[in-house]
Image (cartoon, helix red, strand yellow):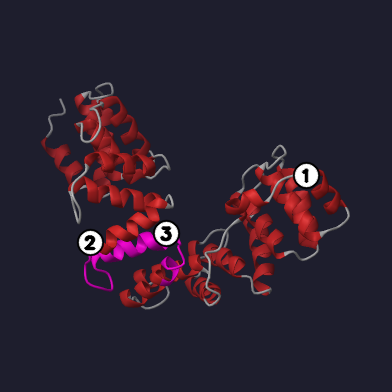
Amino acid sequence: MAIQKSVDDEADEFIFSDSLKKSADKGDLQSQYRMGIVYRLGLGVDKDISESMKWLKKACNRNSTPAQIELGRIYEEGKDVERDYLEAAILYKKAVEKGDPEGMWRLGIMYYKGIGLNQDFPKAFQLFSDAAEKDHARSQNVIGCMHCKGQGIPYNQEVALEWYRKAADQGYARAQCNMGITCELGIGQGRDMSSAIEWYKKAAEQGDKRAQCNLGFTYEVGIGQEKDLRAAAELYRMSADQGYARAQCNLGFMYDNGLGVDENHVIAADLYRRAADQGYARAQCCLGLSHYGGRGVVRDLPAARWLLERAAEQGDDFAREQLNILPWE
């Protein structure tokens, strides 16, 4: 079965037209739903969240499952509208009652992460399991994560691997990355870097930021394949552009040391800062050292100490070591 797609993935199939508007005005349910989408995404018309919600509510009132899910997403995400987790959960539950796997997954995530609802692993697991039986790839992947972490169910690496593979075989990038991690670390199977790299490549080609970073690291250090610093830097860049803190820090290190890119301490410090602002300990350490040495930024000992302390608090041993050996007066 093909991997589930969101409306954003199928945006080309939705476009505003006079005929679509006329059909929606006449009460065609699918057209009303599509009108909600084109206004939400601005497809052939200016984005208008109020107009989008108006049409989605019309479709919801007529029991449209896709409309219930999309309106639930709007309330859950809270973009350009007041966030309302309770309303999102109510809408997802309506979809669940009709056996919709996407609704099961979205409501399951709210229970899994405690988003607007009390965290409840058993409820989340049941929803994911019901969706997984319908070949919902994202649910299969999360079940793998729950088994791998022992969240509400027994810890079992082998079972986790089976669920990751089911989702990965459907082409789900996040599961493909997880398969790469299990192969690299030997989780539920023997360590196999060749297979890990293949899985990372599949996920990276789909734009998965974790896979891009992990694959970049294999190129940077030459694990499982020939070292290629330029390839590593490019993969880190693609991941960093998506806001992935680890990739931002790794790319910063490459700029700091002229590895695969021209040495540039200013760019390095900026990348460290972007990752440090997300609380990434190693980036806090690196940015702290940049401030200590005035490399790419103004020399600022108080800022350097503060950043190194934040990294050390998160368990970064190198930051703790630098705090102890560097002169601070």
Would residue 283 be seen by someone viewing this image from the given angle?
no
Q: Residue at x 74, y 56 (%)?
A: 33
Q: In the displayed structure, does residue 126 sit left or right of residue 149? A: right
Q: Nearer the viewer, mark 1 or mark 2?
A: 1
Q: Residue at x 51, y 62 (%)?
A: 114
Task: Tell me residue 235's x, y (percent).
Answer: 33, 44
Q: Residue at x 61, y 53 (%)?
A: 10
Q: Earlier in the sequence, mark 1 or mark 3?
A: 1
Q: Is residue 172 magenta?
A: yes
Q: Nearer the viewer, residue 21 or 246?
A: 21
Q: Is residue 219 above or below residue 109?
A: above
Residue 193: numbered disc: 2
Task: Tell me residue 226's x, y (percent).
Answer: 18, 49
Residue 17: numbered disc: 1
The span picked out in magenta is 166-193
- Dot 1 amino acid type: Ser
- Dot 3 amino acid type: Arg
Cα separation between marks 1 and 3: 35 Å
Cα separation between marks 2 and 3: 18 Å
Q: Quadrant of residue 163?
A: bottom left
Q: Is residue 255 magenta?
A: no
Badge 2 crowding class, 10 Å Cα cut-off, few under 14, some 14 to 19, many 20 or more, is many
Task: Tell me residue 199's x, y (percent).
Answer: 34, 60
Q: Nearer the viewer, residue 255 or 82?
A: 255
Residue 174: numbered disc: 3
Q: Residue at x 71, y 46 (%)?
A: 15
Answer yes or no: do the residues labelled 1 and 3 have beta carbons within 8 Å?
no
Mark 1, secondary structure of its residue: loop
Residue 257: numbered disc: none
Mark 2, secondary structure of its residue: helix
